[in-house]
């Protein structure tokens, strides 16, 4: 009896020792890989840059070392695609002329910004003077019997509209989707351009908005010719206050309408607008990195569980490297480590694909291209996305989207967590009416649009978000390890199910 107890004790000690060694090995991989991914040498990994290319080569080399096979173009690890990279002349100006002939001038970046400008079909808008007309929220909904353009002729005019919507049915629409929705309506009615009246609370983010909208713009090359959108103009708070000062409603009054979701009367502004600008763009290459761990079951091998995260960040701005250690170096190294651990186990019946997306910071463009340009998309049974997982509390993790399409997937993830790392899941950003719209703001979203069950793991790091201070020394590697182990278990559970995950809910757009 004593010998039996001794044997059991020795086995338990050996298991604990092996587990500890395994964890230490994983932590070493995670840390060393991130120290390179988020180093000065990779220059912030901006899409289409030299730094991004080096990062993609490093990722491919690691996958090969782990025994993960290439699954990109022409038996490589890379899925190449072209992006149009455009910019607006910094000398662009807007001038307003009132009925007395008084001229007011505004400068690009300091006073105004606009979305999508480098990809207009031409610069025909530039240099011409236009009337401006206020059209409520700029929304039409037949379902709600609502029309902000009723009895308005906006042909050849610049439309001024309020941000947001008074309609509950449109509240869940994402920021970009709402912008495009309004722009497309105005364009279809013959408007020449659109000015958005932004509510005051959003001006707390004006510095970030300036950074993104005054820099280069990015689009998939195959979509550039489809971009027929009219100029969409944002003014700074001071410039917008100035613009509306002598009109029927001033800025403070319109801001109050937005807050109350009330609709003011339409009116023609007293001033005319002229925008003078130049836009240029060039075509550059970017690439996703894709590897595969083939399944053991020949009947299931052609179905895929996918594990991914974006590896790009914001590059160099004003000579300063934006390292992106958490966003999303942490997710990148976790995908790599998940691949290494699963390749060691070789227990998966379905194949597992590892996606490293480019150009997430430019509008989820890498994942959009991938989801729409692979012939196996209908064979993808689940998508697991890690985007920022190395900050906040060590046991705290935001779980987004796991139950949006599949109750079975939601329960499977909870079970995997309960039986492994026991992280505290936070679902507060998972609500369909969440104003942050995180569900639509990372790469899993393009898979969800295909009806594929998804989960998005996220840490909501705020203090260093999109700043050069997002550095390796602030990463909690124990947390990254725990999330990695969780994803390893989820991927393996889905890969070994005797059936495809049941999709029992509508696609949430």
Image (cartoon, rainbow, N blue to C red):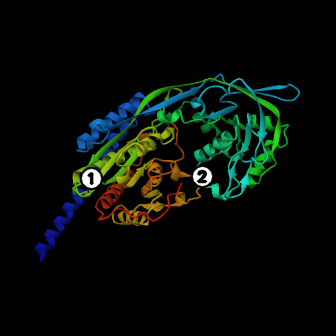
Residue 103 is marked as none
Residue 7, quarter of picture: bottom left
Q: Height in image: 277 above or below 305? A: above
Mark nearer the viewer, 1 or 2: 2
Where residue 307 appears, as percent x and y from the top left, is 36, 50
Q: Position of residue 364 (x, y in %)?
A: 48, 42
Q: Determine whether the residue tagged by mark 1 lies in a helix, strand or loop.
A: helix
Query: Residue 191: x, y in percent?
Result: 71, 37
What residue is drawn where x is 77% and y is 48%?
Answer: 150
Q: Is residue 248 left or right of residue 482?
A: right
Q: Quadrant of the C terminus?
A: bottom right
Q: Quadrant of residue 280?
A: top right
Residue 111, placed above or below residue 444: above
Upstream in the sequence, badge 1 or badge 2?
2
Q: Which residue is mark 1?
A: 342
Under circle 2, the secondary element is loop
Residue 88 image position (x, y, % from top left): 60, 26
Query: In the depicted view, which residue is nearer to us: 357 or 65?
Result: 357
Q: Which residue is mark 2?
A: 173
Foreground: 106 or 189? 189
């Amino acid at each position: 009896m004593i010998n039996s107890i001794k044997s059991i004790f020795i086995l338990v000690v050996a298991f604990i020792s092996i587990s500890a060694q395994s964890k230490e090995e994983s932590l070493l991989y995670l840390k060393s890989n991130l120290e390179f991914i988020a180093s000065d040498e990779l220059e912030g990994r901006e899409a289409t840059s030299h730094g991004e290319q080096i990062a993609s080569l490093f990722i491919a080399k690691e996958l090969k070392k782990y025994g993960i096979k290439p699954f990109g173009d022409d038996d490589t690890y890379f899925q190449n695609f072209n992006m149009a990279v455009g910019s607006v002349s910094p000398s662009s100006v807007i001038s307003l002329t009132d009925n007395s002939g008084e001229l007011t001038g505004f400068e690009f970046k300091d006073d105004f910004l606009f979305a999508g400008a480098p990809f207009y079909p031409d610069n025909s808008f530039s240099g011409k003077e236009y009337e401006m007309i206020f059209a409520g929220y700029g929304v039409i909904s037949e379902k709600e019997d609502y029309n902000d353009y009723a009895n308005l002729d906006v042909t050849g005019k610049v439309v001024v509209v309020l941000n947001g919507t008074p309609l509950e049915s449109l509240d869940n629409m994402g920021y970009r989707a709402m912008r495009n929705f309004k722009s497309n309506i105005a364009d279809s009615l013959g408007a020449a351009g659109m000015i958005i009246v932004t509510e005051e609370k959003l001006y707390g983010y004006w510095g970030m908005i300036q950074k993104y909208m005054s820099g280069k713009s990015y689009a998939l090359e195959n979509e550039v010719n489809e971009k027929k959108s009219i100029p969409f103009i944002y003014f700074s708070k001071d410039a917008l206050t100035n613009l509306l000062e002598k009109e029927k409603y001033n800025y403070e009054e319109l801001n109050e309408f937005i807050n109350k979701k009330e609709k003011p009367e339409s009116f023609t502004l007293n001033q005319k607008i002229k925008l003078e600008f130049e836009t240029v763009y060039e075509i550059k290459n970017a690439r996703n990195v894709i590897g595969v761990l083939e399944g053991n079951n020949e009947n299931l091998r052609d179905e895929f569980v996918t594990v991914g995260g974006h590896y790009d960040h914001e590059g160099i701005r004003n000579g300063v490297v934006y390292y992106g250690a958490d966003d999303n170096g942490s997710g990148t190294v976790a995908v790599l480590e998940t691949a290494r651990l699963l390749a060691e186990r070789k227990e998966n019946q379905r194949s597992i694909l590892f996606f490293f997306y480019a150009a997430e910071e430019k509008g989820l463009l890498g994942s959009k291209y991938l989801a729409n340009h692979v012939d196996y998309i209908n064979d993808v049974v689940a998508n697991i996305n890690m985007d920022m997982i190395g900050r906040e509390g060590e046991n705290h993790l935001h779980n987004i989207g796991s139950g949006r399409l599949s109750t079975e997937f939601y329960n499977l993830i909870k079970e995997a967590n309960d039986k492994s790392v026991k992280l505290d899941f936070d679902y507060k950003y998972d609500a369909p009416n969440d104003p942050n719209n995180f569900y639509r703001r990372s790469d899993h979203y393009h898979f969800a649009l295909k009806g594929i069950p998804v989960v998005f793991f996220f840490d909501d790091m705020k203090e260093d978000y999109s700043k050069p201070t997002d550095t390796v020394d602030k990463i909690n590697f124990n947390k990254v390890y725990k999330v990695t182990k969780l994803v390893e278990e989820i991927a393996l559970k889905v890969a070994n199910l005797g059936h495809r995950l049941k999709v029992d809910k509508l696609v949430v757009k």
